[in-house]
Amino acid sequence: MSTKISVIPGDGIGPEIMNATLRVLDALDAGLEYEMVEAGLIALEKEGELIPESTLESIGRNRVVLKGPLTTPVGKGFRSINVTLRKQFDLYANVRPVISMAGTRSHFEDIDIITVRENTQGAYLAADAKISEDGETAESKMVVTRDGCDRITHYAFELARREGRKKVTIVHKANILKTVSGMFLDIAREVAKEYPEIETEEMIVDACCMKLVMNPWQFDVIVTTNLFGDIISDLCAGLVGGLGLAPGANIGKDAAMFEAVHGSAPDIAGQKIANPCALMLGAAQMLSHLGMEDKARKLRSAIRETLAQGDRTTPDVGGSGTTQSMTDAIIDRLG
Ligand code: NAD
């Protein structure tokens, strides 16, 4: 029996890399049925809404979404579509793994770090955001809850335990943001006590960024709040050769959404040179989530080999190929 998933191709390079990713999933014979739905600029133009009701219904029904990057128009009063989807389906854990792969333009080797970012609270919810009538003052509240801090840190430690990871680094700014970051740190410390076999370390976010660049090998799993997690995970993507290689899973109790960390890359949209690997690695996370670990492993290894050989790869990783040629090279290795 096939499993139906919702698929949002997205904006900019989204449709190009989604097409490539669905080809790979078909080649893997993953038994998936795709319900194609829209969101983002395309949906706004066609249906007058960034996230049409039919898209929300599809996600609510299928509970698994593969999503291309979406463009939220800036400065027109639109709330980020990604933030809205994460909030609507309570996708509280954003899991962003990065791993070194030969054949990329990375400055580092042997990196293997997972950032677990709280996805539904904090600065990105922009609670009570407003600009004063005279236009001189802008404000927005940062809110976290005890339950929100508790479940994200439990998620990170459970993931570390499940994957046999050695260390969790709790990243915060409790020295300055004493209430919000302070509550996160206090709760994370309590949760850590339940996992005595896992080493726990605490780090202030600015120092963490410096240490990630100076000595990234000291990191294993990082758990942090929404804004810090967004920035740190892009930094980690840079450690392994850029955004074209970094996937992200958004996990909730009742639904999950899989994507690339990068955006819609309007600067290269339509040029057919977008690297499809980040979304494909997101699809691999989805296959694991659906219990198809063998297919997930096969896909990751085909991507790794293609990059290592520099076989028909895209320009961002030093090749002169296209999205399509790189996808062909990956499919050739799926055997
Ligand atoms: P971006 O990630 O789209 O692009 C940053 C740089 O990385 C660009 O030079 C781009 O060409 C390059 N790049 C990104 N993905 C690539 C790929 N697969 N292959 C090769 N090169 C790639 O970031 P941006 O330009 O700041 O944002 C563009 C739009 O994307 C904005 O509207 C933003 O809101 C949106 N965005 C969406 C998501 C998402 O849907 N998850 C995430 C981030 C940004």
Image (cartoon, grey):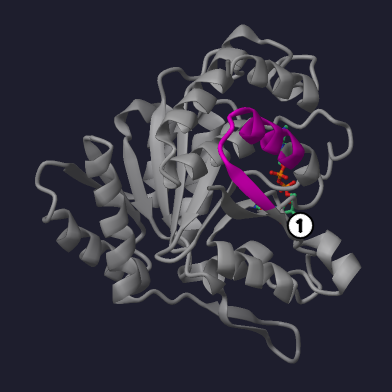
Residue 58 x, y percent position in the rendering: 65, 66
In the drawing, does residue 182 fall left or right of residue 305? left
For the question of whether residue 106 can be seen, the reply is no
Magenta span includes 180: no
- The picture places residue 228, in percent across and down from the top left corner, at 46, 55
- Helix, strand or loop under label 1: loop
Q: Please state if 268 lies on the left or on the right of 125 as rendered.
A: right
Tell me which residue sits at (31%, 55%) in the image: 155
Q: Considering depth in this image, is 335 or 204 the residue closer to the camera?
A: 335
Whether the residue under disc 1 has CB within 8 Å of ligand 1: yes
Q: Is residue 234 above or below residue 305?
A: below
| Residue tagged 1 | 71
**Does residue 31 belong to the magenta stretch?**
yes
Q: Is residue 172 above or below residue 26?
A: below
Which amino acid is tagged 1?
Thr
Residue 267 position, x and y percent, is 84, 40
Q: Which residues are magenta?
A: 18-34
Residue 212: x and y in percent read: 41, 34
Give the tally of numbered discs: 1
* Residue projecting furthest to the bottom: 133
Identify the residue shown where x is 58% and y is 15%: 335
> Is the residue marked by circle 1 packed among few (<14), some (14-19), or many (20+) residues within 10 Å?
many
Judged from the image, the quadrant occupied by ligand 1 is: top right
